[in-house]
Image (cartoon, rainbow, N blue to C red):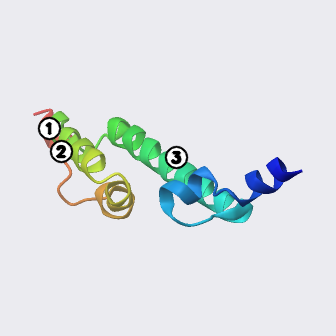
Amino acid sequence: MQVATFLSQQPSTAEQVLGVGLGTLGLVIALAVIFGGLILFLAALISIIRSPNYTVAGRAVWIFVVLAFPFLGPLVWFVWGRKSTFAVDVSHSLR
């Protein structure tokens, strides 16, 4: 019985690493934020690659921005980058 009491008083790995106890709800929220950020990151990369508005160099710049700023980069892409005025006019490029 002393072993069970001793083990229950030991801090969890999260408490040892982060210095705080997350608890079950905190762990679920942290995992949801991480998973949401990962989905946003991957969706931005796919959207950039499929975007017809940019040249290869423009796409490379946007991919660099998303990779350099993993949370802010995808947000900027979805808010501003997809409809940017710096897009290439495809109708004039064929002449």
Cα–Cα span, label 2 and label 1 = 6 Å
Residue to which mark 1 is pinned: 57
- Find the residue positioned furthest to the right: 1
Residue 80 x %, y %: 31, 63
Which quarter of the image is occupied by the C terminus? top left
Q: Nearer the viewer, mark 2 or mark 3?
A: 3
Of 82 and 76, the residue lying toward us: 76
Of 24 and 69, the residue lying toward us: 24
User: Is residue 33 among the parts visible in the rendering?
Assistant: no
| Disc marking residue 13 | none
Among the 4 quarters of the image, the one containing residue 21: bottom right
Q: Circle 1 sits in a helix, a strand or a loop, which is it?
A: helix
Q: Would residue 4 be found to the left or right of residue 33 on screen?
A: right
Callout 2 amino acid: Val
Of 63 and 38, the residue lying toward us: 38
Q: Are marks 2 and 1 in contact (CB under 8 Å)?
A: yes
Residue to which mark 3 is pinned: 39
Cα–Cα span, label 2 and label 3 = 20 Å
The residue sitting at 15% across, 32% down in the picture is: 94
Residue 19 x %, y %: 51, 64
Cα–Cα span, label 3 and label 1 = 24 Å
> Looking at the image, is 88 positioned above or below residue 5?
above
Callout 3 amino acid: Ile
Callout 1 amino acid: Ala
Q: Circle 2 sits in a helix, a strand or a loop, which is it?
A: helix
The residue sitting at 34% across, 61% down in the picture is: 72
Of 29 and 94, the residue lying toward us: 29
The residue sitting at 19% across, 47% down in the picture is: 89
User: Is residue 5 among the parts visible in the rendering?
Assistant: yes
For marks 3 and 1, the one nearer the N-term is: 3
| Disc marking residue 61 | 2
